[in-house]
Amino acid sequence: MNDFKALSEAISKGDINKAVAETKSALEAGISAQDILNQGLIATMNEVGDRYSKGLIFVPQMLRSAKTMQECTKLLKPYFQEGDVVSKGQVLMGTVRGDLHDIGKNLVSMMLEGAGFTITDLGVDVAPEIFVEKVREVEPDIVGMSALLSTTMPAMADTIEALQKAGLRKKVKIMIGGAPVTERYAQKIGADAYGSDAGSAVTRAKELLGIDRSEE
Amino acid sequence: MVIVGEKINTSRKNVEDAVRRRDAAAIAAMAREQAEAGAHYIDINAGTFVDEEVDCLCWLTETVQQAMPLPLSLDSPNPVALAEAMKLHRGEPMVNSISLEQERLDSLLPVITSQPCSVVALCMARTSMPVTTEERVQVGSELVETLTAEGVPREKIYVDPLIQPVSVNTDMGVAALGAIRRIMEDFPGVNAICGLSNISFGLPERRLINRSFLALCMAYGLSAVILDPTDRQLMATLLSVELLLGRDEYCGNFIDAYQSGRIAG
């Protein structure tokens, strides 16, 4: 096991310069990009997400850590070999039809990215037929839907129905969230999971794909 | 300052329970409590009921108006719910809200012009949320022009600059403040209104941030606000800022509120 304590601290604090320097020196020391990513960056972001879910840190701190991680990930990219598994899973994200709110969706996307998922962000006001089209095209493992208004929540059910009709429902896991959304609503409309905040969305996504933390 | 009491919102657990049970006494108490604390309008929002929202909003309209004499702020993005509640409302309600989102605008304009009412014009653009002051003013201006062209007088228009969290983008506070100032300067007679709690999403000590933001908004020209009037610290901020802005003759409102125990430092 390599020692990523200094890197981890720099990411937690959101110190970009320090984190970038630590990433560089890890690469120079011959540690594989894969190990730096998993044991250094992703492991730290998992802790950051947990601390946010528990209310120990706040949104700006989480954003800062995520941004720091992104800068470190950029440095690793040229070192990945063909065939390296660098994604924990493919997630298609969007705010549903009629809804223009993107802050929650963006926070979740950022934390999923931090946890090693690959995100395709469809933006806001995404109609069910667009979700269907993109599921066909991208073949994601998970579809994540966000709604911030009680009036647009039903568009989540419409999207699930559209995926069902297109014969795609069984090919993806569906995760939903947003201020008015509840666990009960997720069950009611047949979603596979509900995330109450960006940190727990990551936990739910891992559960959906059977990713065990101890394997990381 | 026009004060809209925000407490009767079914996203609060106790309100949702009361509405589900159709507990008129509990709802009446929440309405009276806010009226006594200084509200001018009582906001009612039954959004969490989704399919039953129309019924719930109508029931709330009648229940709250039976409890006290104030007009209501009918709070829903759903045009059908607003139209039905308006039919039952006595006096002039505040319709909360319209925006430039096409479907919402098209279906609400006839409702708003069908009877006298005030209207909250939310600075939500057609396909995105505005970020800069400029973008907010653009949307706000378009809304004011659309409404006045339909015959709604300026004094009945309450422009909401759309408050977004500073935790995500530290320019969000300044952007909203700038929009308040510009809208109030460009359209004399129009009101500027906002809610406060979105500003502090994702941060600790949210009530402190909300209070500080209220003071700033007022300095930039805010003329109405959606808040919990039974929050004595928040009301203390509101009344002391009014006083400092020279809008409280002989400091009478502030002293009255102090002597009757409605504010806390």
Image (tube, helix red, strand yellow):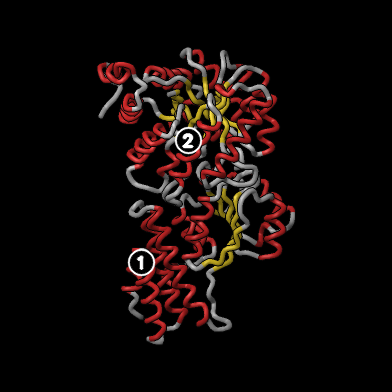
> Quadrant where the C terminus of chain B lies?
top left
Q: Which mark is residue A182?
A: none
Q: Which residue is mark 2?
A: B181
Residue A44 pos. (x, y %): 38, 67
Q: Which mark is residue A15?
A: 1
Quarter of the image containing the N terminus of chain B?
top left
Gap in angstroms between the C-alphas marked 2 and 1? 37 Å
Local SS, label 2: helix
| Residue A179 x/y as whole percent | 50, 43
Q: Which amino acid, mark 2?
A: Arg
Compared to B216, does B27 lie above or below?
Answer: above
Mark yes or no: residue A160 visible: no
Q: Label 2 marks which chain's residue?
A: B
Query: In the picture shown, does residue B91 fall above or below A185?
Result: above
Taking A81 as reference, is A131 left or right? right
Can residue A203 be spotted in the picture?
yes
At x 29% / y 16%, what residue is drawn? B250
Q: Who's the residue at 38% across and 36% down the image? A: B216
Q: Chain of mark 1?
A: A
- Horizontal side of residue B125 vs A53, given as left or right: right
Q: Quadrant of residue B206?
A: top left
